Image: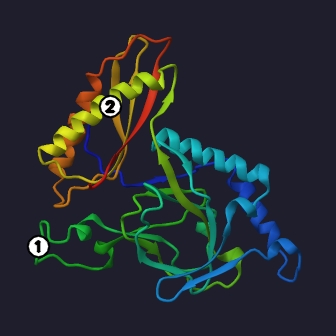
Amino acid sequence: MANNRKSVLTIDSFTGNAKALRDHFEDRFADPRSTRADRFVWDYWHVPGQYTALRTPAYHFFPKKIYEAFHNELVWWGRRNLGCHDVSPPWMSCYIDGCRQELHGDLPHGPWAFVYSLTPWKKRKFRGGETILLKEEILNFWHGFQSTRSLEREHIVTEVPSLFNRLTVFDPRIPHGVNEVKGVQDVLDGRLVIHGWFVQPRPFIEGPLSTKELQVRIDDLSGEINRLFAEGLDVQGVLSMRFEVSAQGRVSRPQVLSNALRHPGGDQRIEKALLKHIAQFLEAAPFRKQRGPSSVTLPLVFEAT
């Protein structure tokens, strides 16, 4: 099993509901002289030196049928890929000229943050608007430091464009923000996103495997991890894995879905060894025979005590 750092995920063409969501937004704001009541929705959110954007609760903005279809897709994606069973009530934010978010961390809202874009990015009229995240090299700046290496913006932050129908998921502990949007005043031309956090991490089973039997194996794994911590293991973060359980009870194909584990010293060898150890432990876990195969998404939360 590879030790892939998967603390920032991008999923393009996320939902078939993107056009319906965007069409409703454009219809509501098509006529700038209109005084229809449902245009009066924006909170102008401004914290000096930190945040500036227009925002509104997404679940109140869209028609129920359209929004629930999107929301359900988002929830089920989180269950299958993160082991998070719900999302926080999402915001919809629009960024026009002068709007931005300076670097910050989202703690303790949820183990994973998400940004879903309804921005016609390829036709945009503005500059800026990318989601920015500090790079790993900056978070562990002195680890492997080379005084002869140049250091400019592209070496400090990763920029993620807000492509239309793109879902970006990331470890909210990573300092992140939004590049200032410049050049547009109309909300129809702005950066439009739905955002929030995946929450309630717990195992997700697809198939006949019982939660009671899975809990026994999770308790065994927790005991093993506690032993490793007692011996000096020091990592924090959330790891989400998927594995298959055959009808005969055999575990196969453990894989990392998302990985926000971090060693305080930035030692990826420790993280890699831990992932390998967990995969081997899961593969050796005995399950009873069942009516058919099951797929399990297992989130593991490592916190400082």
Q: How many marks?
A: 2
Q: Which mark is residue 146?
A: 1
254 is higher (above) or lower (below) than 74: above
> What percent of the width, then of the height, locates residue 155?
28, 73
The 10 Å Cα crowd at callout 2, few under 14, some 14 to 19, many 20 or more, is few
Q: Quadrant of the C terminus?
A: bottom left
164 is higher (above) or lower (below) than 79: below
**Amino acid bearing label 1:** Gln
Observer able to see residue 119 = no
Q: Which residue corresponds to the image point at 20% horizontal and 44% vertical from the top-left?
A: 272
**Local SS, label 2:** helix
295 is higher (above) or lower (below) than 50: above
Q: Which mark is residue 106?
A: none
User: For this rendering, which residue is in front, 216 or 161?
Assistant: 216
> What percent of the width, then of the height, locates residue 150?
19, 78
Q: Which residue corresponds to the image point at 19% horizontal and 71% vertical from the top-left?
A: 141
> What percent of the width, then of the height, locates residue 71?
65, 50
The 10 Å Cα crowd at callout 1, few under 14, some 14 to 19, many 20 or more, is few
User: For this rendering, which residue is in front, 244 or 221?
Assistant: 221
**Amino acid bearing label 2:** Asp
Q: Which residue corresponds to the image point at 50% horizontal and 11% vertical from the top-left?
A: 291
Q: Which residue corresponds to the image point at 22% horizontal and 40% vertical from the top-left?
A: 226
Q: Is residue 22 left or right of residue 14?
A: right
Q: Which residue is mark 2?
A: 219
User: For this rendering, which residue is in front, 131 or 44?
Assistant: 44
**Local SS, label 1:** loop
